[in-house]
C-alpha cells in the first residue's frame, strides 16, 4: 500500500519538496513490486506510521527493489496533523539534507 494523491501524506511530501511517484493514483492503493519498479522512484520512505517499518525491512525491500534508496522516516510527521506540524519544518529540512547526501553517493 502507498500514500497516493488526495492524501495528507501526499500534501506533506509536496510541501516538503519531494515528488510522490504515485500522486496520480487516489488515496491508499495497494501496489505490487512491479508497479513500484515501473514508477521508478529514486527513494522510498518507509514510515513508522501506520505500519511500523524497522531496520530489518530495509534489507527485505532492498533485495526486492535493488537500486532504490530506502529511508526510514517518522510517520507522525508525515501523517498526523495538529501539534506535530510544529515539528515538520525542521524535520523536513533535515530529511532533505539527508536525502541530498544519499543521492550524492549513489
Image (cartoon, rainbow, N blue to C red):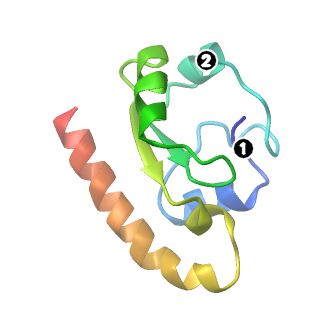
Residue at the spot of label 1:
4
Mark 2 neighbour density, 10 Å: few (under 14) some (14–19) many (20 or more): few
Q: Quadrant of residue 13?
A: bottom right
Q: Which mark is residue 52?
A: none
Q: Tell me the residue at 47%/59% (across/down).
A: 17
Marks 1/2: CA–CA distance: 16 Å
Q: Please tell me which residue lies in front, 68 or 52.
A: 52
Residue count near mark 1 (Cα–Cα under 10 Å), binned few <14, some 14–19, many ≥20:
many
User: Can residue 42 be seen from the camera position used here?
Assistant: no
Residue 57 vertical placement versus 49 (above, below): above
Using the image as rendered, state which of residue 73 and residue 20 is in the foreground.
73
Q: Quadrant of residue 82?
A: bottom right
Residue toward you, 11 or 33: 33
Using the image, determine if residue 38 lies above or below residue 48.
above
Residue at 33 percent of width and 67 percent of height: 94
Residue 75 place in picture, x, y as percent = 58, 59
Where residue 33 is drawn, which disc sits there? 2
Rendered residue at 73%/38% (across/down): 24
First in sequence: mark 1 vs mark 2: 1
Point out the image quarter for the C terminus: top left
Percent x, y for residue 77?
A: 57, 68
> Which secondary structure, mark 2?
helix
Which residue is the extreme one toward the left?
A: 105
Residue 22 x %, y %: 66, 37
Q: Could you say whether the residue bearing mark 1 is in a helix, strand or loop?
A: loop
Q: Is 8 situated left or right of 36 in this image?
A: right
Amino acid at each position: 500500500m502507498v500514500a497516493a494523491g488526495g492524501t495528507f501524506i501526499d500534501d506533506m511530501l509536496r510541501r516538503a519538496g519531494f515528488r510522490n511517484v504515485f500522486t496520480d493514483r487516489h488515496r491508499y492503493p495497494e501496489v505490487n513490486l512491479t508497479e513500484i519498479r515501473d514508477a521508478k522512484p529514486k527513494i522510498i520512505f518507509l514510515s513508522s506510521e501506520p505500519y511500523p517499518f524497522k531496520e530489518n525491512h530495509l534489507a527485505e525491500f532492498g533485495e526486492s527493489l535493488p537500486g532504490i534508496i530506502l529511508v526510514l522516516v517518522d510517520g507522525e510527521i508525515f501523517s498526523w496533523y495538529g501539534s506535530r506540524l510544529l515539528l515538520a519544518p525542521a524535520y523536513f529540512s533535515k530529511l532533505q539534507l539527508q536525502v541530498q547526501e544519499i543521492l550524492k553517493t549513489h
